Image (spheres, rainbow, N blue to C red):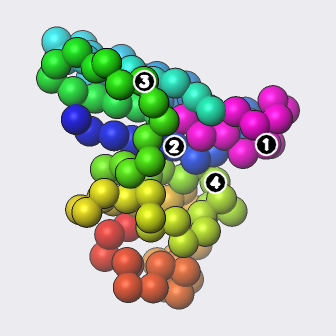
Amino acid sequence: MIDVLWHGRGGQGAFTAAKLLGAAYAVRGSYSIAFPSFGPERRGAPVRAFTKLDSCRIGDRSEIEKADYVIYLDDTLFFNSFDELKENGKIIINTKKTPEEMRPLLGGYAGRV
């Protein structure tokens, strides 16, 4: 199973992106589920969304604790959360910062982003 964890802010489309990824994967005849986790439901509040992709039916509907991909739609939400990654997981960060500006935040994980 491929697990994708999305971090965004209310109104950025994290849940929509999670659903679109799942729908695109399912078009191939595979299976997917996508669901959100909201705190206070207001624009700008932190939001987490989850996408699970697999070649067989997915019965586990729990939140993802360790993901293959962790995607940050807002770089202000990134806070050294490498504990959310599986062994060979990757982080994708939407940012205006250059790679040189991001390296200090990433420590030894710079190659995984």
Dot 2: few (<14), some (14–19), or many (≥20) neighbours within 10 Å? many
Q: Earlier in the sequence, mark 2 or mark 4?
A: 2
Badge 1, how many Cα within 10 Å: few under 14, some, many 20+?
few
**Residue labelled with disc 4:** 74
Residue density around tag 3, few if under 14, some if 14–19, many if 20 or more, within 10 Å = few
12 vs 89, nearest the viewer: 89
Distance in Å between CA atoms under marks 4 and 1 = 11 Å
Residue identified by numbered label 1: 45
Q: Secondary structure at mark 3?
A: loop
**Could you say where residue 31 lies in the image, as x and y percent from the top left?**
25, 17
Type of amino acid at the residue the image marks with label 3: Arg
Q: Which mark is residue 61?
A: 3
Tag shown at residue 6? 2
- Whether residue 41 appears in magenta in the rendering, the answer is yes
The quarter of the rendered structure image containing the C terminus is bottom left
Magenta segment range? 38-49
Number of marks in the rendered image:
4
Question: Residue 40 appears in which quarter of the rendering?
Answer: top right
Q: Position of residue 72 (x, y in %)?
A: 54, 53
